[in-house]
Image (cartoon, helix red, strand yellow):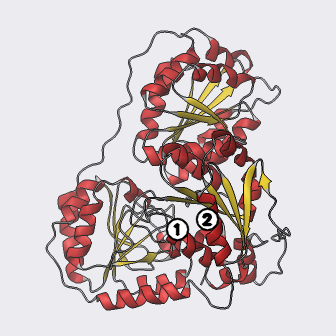
């Protein structure tokens, strides 16, 4: 076997099913090995999309997603998608196919230092010059899967890819384990609950890797506490629950902050400040930070507990704490949710993003998956969309790169071909990733892409308005109508709620991809995104 075949065999044994990327000369030996394996090479329109798709596969399956690129510009394109895995905590193996080893230190066409490029955005960067092919892949997979999960870079020179495989080394990467600090935590939290009048629970990105959601919900119910979440934690506790009180830092954030400001104790379970810093919303309120990583300390932050520990063991332990009385009432939670519901749906617009989202929520089954891109609609979806099921919303928050939504939806459809999948993206994000429609057509992925066309980079428009800058550099312009197809993918416009609902029904009858272009009013964002 040559080294490319050994690499592919190791990926197969790890459960990898796809490698996403764009071919070139140095990539061809790897693609040839993949052709003769059970792993599919999925051609994307750009390496950036390949990184996003690998991120989503890693997040949904807990098996590392894999992406590959060529030397130089292929690697620089790939790093944007890999950065998503880095800050949104998903296991990914990023393979850069390099020039031959005699040229690795030379200043030649296309060659750059791949290790320097990937060092800041990966957990490790490994050269096949330093390890056998089998050992390099197995080491990379182990590091990518170790908590917190993330991307690992492998650099594959072309001559090594084609060389005969050497002996397989037997060294192993031993993952670290989080200590069980349940006894100390339980003692501190019990005292804190006894002294507090209005404790509040918040969950975040790290909680999405917990297996103790049921135990945490039991703790919340037993202690009669409200809970809020970050964007990534949506659905990991049911949002139909009467104790659910919203998503921090998104649309109508001032309403959420007014609610969280009532709390005199914050019990943060699996909270990762990469989504939103504690300083942005906690003030001097005491914090019990329960997670696998400690939180960075900052000015005015007051931590009662801040130690890395076994998260599931910690949740199971606190769920047994005896009930402690507090001053919250279910009535004020309900009143808060009702006011938030109405604030997210401002009057005076005929067809806005919130109309699209309400119609889509009615249409998409509970088990369906919504992937969405970055923009003003990200804030609206995070606050407005309700789900009770984990991993039914795909978004990037730590990385927050435009261009994520469409590749994310297509990756989800590969993982779950029988489940309904839909993407909501802005017109700016659509312009960035429209080429991926060719991928959907080629693989016949039945995923409706809903483009919210308001003619603006909506989030930047709102930010300019808030800073009282003249609007500049944010106008995209509305085309007069939707073309009949993009890359052979049929399209349909919608300019009202009724037309949008009809377009959803139309898309559901198609045996393949589709685009629905919803022409919405951008003005509603001005009163929801940052208020």
Q: Is residue 105 visible?
A: no
Count of numbered tags: 2
Quarter of the image for residue 145 reads top left
307 vs 78, left or right, is: left
User: Residue 258: where, in percent of width, then height?
Assistant: 46, 87
Q: Earlier in the sequence, mark 2 or mark 1?
A: 1
User: Residue 71: where, in percent of width, then height?
Assistant: 72, 30
On screen, residue 150 above or below 308? above
Camera-side residue of 356 and 199: 356
On screen, residue 118 above or below 356? above
Give the labeled residue for mark 2: 504
Mark on residue 363? 1
At horizontal 59% and vertical 45% (from top left) the residue drawn is: 53
Camera-side residue of 266 and 323: 323
Mark 2 residue crowding within 10 angstroms, few (<14) / some (14–19) / many (20+): many
Cα distance between the residues tagged 2 and 1: 8 Å
Quadrant location, the C terminus:
bottom right
**Label 1: which secondary element:** helix
Quarter of the image for residue 374 reads bottom right
Mark 1 residue crowding within 10 angstroms, few (<14) / some (14–19) / many (20+): few
Camera-side residue of 304 and 411: 411
Disc 2 to disc 1: CB gap under 8 Å: yes
User: Residue 253: where, in percent of width, then height?
Assistant: 53, 80
């Amino acid at each position: 076997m040559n080294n490319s075949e050994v690499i592919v065999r190791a990926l197969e044994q790890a459960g990898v099913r796809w490698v996403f990327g764009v071919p070139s000369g140095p990539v061809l030996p790897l693609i040839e090995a993949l052709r003769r394996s059970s792993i599919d090479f999925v051609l994307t329109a750009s390496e950036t999309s390949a990184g996003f798709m690998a991120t989503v596969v890693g997040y949904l399956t807990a098996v590392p997603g894999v992406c590959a690129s060529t030397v130089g510009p292929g690697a620089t394109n790939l790093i944007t998608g890999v950065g998503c895995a880095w800050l949104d905590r998903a296991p990914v193996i990023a393979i850069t196919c390099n020039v031959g080893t005699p040229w690795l230190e030379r200043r030649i066409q296309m060659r750059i230092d791949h290790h320097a490029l990937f060092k800041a955005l990966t957990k490790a960067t490994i050269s096949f010059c330093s390890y056998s092919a089998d050992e390099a892949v197995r080491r990379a997979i182990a590091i990518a899967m170790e908590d917190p999960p993330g991307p690992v870079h492998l650099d594959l020179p072309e001559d090594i890819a084609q060389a005969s495989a050497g002996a397989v080394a037997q060294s192993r990467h031993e993952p670290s384990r989080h200590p069980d600090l349940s006894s100390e935590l339980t003692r501190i939290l019990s005292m804190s609950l006894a002294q507090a009048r209005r404790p509040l629970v918040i969950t975040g990105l790290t909680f999405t890797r917990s297996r103790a959601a049921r135990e945490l919900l039991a703790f919340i119910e037993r202690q009669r506490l409200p809970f809020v979440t970050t964007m990534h934690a949506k659905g990991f506790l049911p949002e139909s629950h009467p104790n659910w009180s919203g998503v921090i830092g998104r649309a109508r954030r001032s309403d959420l902050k007014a609610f969280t400001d009532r709390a005199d104790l914050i019990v943060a379970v699996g909270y990762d400040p990469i989504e939103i810093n504690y300083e942005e919303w906690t003030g001097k309120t005491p914090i019990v930070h329960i997670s696998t990583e400690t939180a960075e300390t900052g000015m005015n932050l007051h931590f009662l507990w801040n130690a890395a520990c076994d998260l599931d063991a910690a949740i199971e332990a606190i769920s047994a704490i005896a009930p402690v009385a507090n001053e919250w009432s279910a009535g004020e939670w309900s009143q808060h949710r009702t006011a938030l519901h109405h604030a997210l749906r401002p009057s005076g617009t005929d067809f806005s993003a919130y109309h699209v989202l309400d119609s889509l929520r009615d249409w998409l089954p509970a088990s369906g998956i919504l992937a969405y891109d970055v923009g003003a609609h990200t804030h609206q979806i995070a606050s407005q969309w309700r789900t009770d099921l984990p991993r039914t919303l795909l978004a990037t928050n730590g990385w927050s790169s435009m261009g994520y939504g469409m590749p994310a939806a297509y990756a989800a459809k590969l993982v779950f071909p029988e489940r309904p999948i839909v993407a909501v993206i802005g017109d700016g994000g659509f312009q960035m990733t429209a080429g991926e429609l060719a991928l959907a057509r080629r693989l016949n992925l039945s995923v409706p892409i809903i483009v919210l066309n308001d003619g603006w980079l909506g989030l930047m428009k709102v930010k300019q308005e808030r800073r009282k800058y003249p609007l500049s550099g944010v106008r995209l312009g509305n085309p007069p109508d939707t073309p009949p197809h993009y890359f052979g993918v049929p399209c349909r416009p919608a300019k009202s709620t009724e037309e949008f609902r009809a377009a959803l029904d139309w898309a559901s009858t198609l045996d393949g991809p589709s685009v629905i272009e919803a022409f919405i009013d951008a003005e509603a964002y001005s009163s929801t995104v940052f208020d």
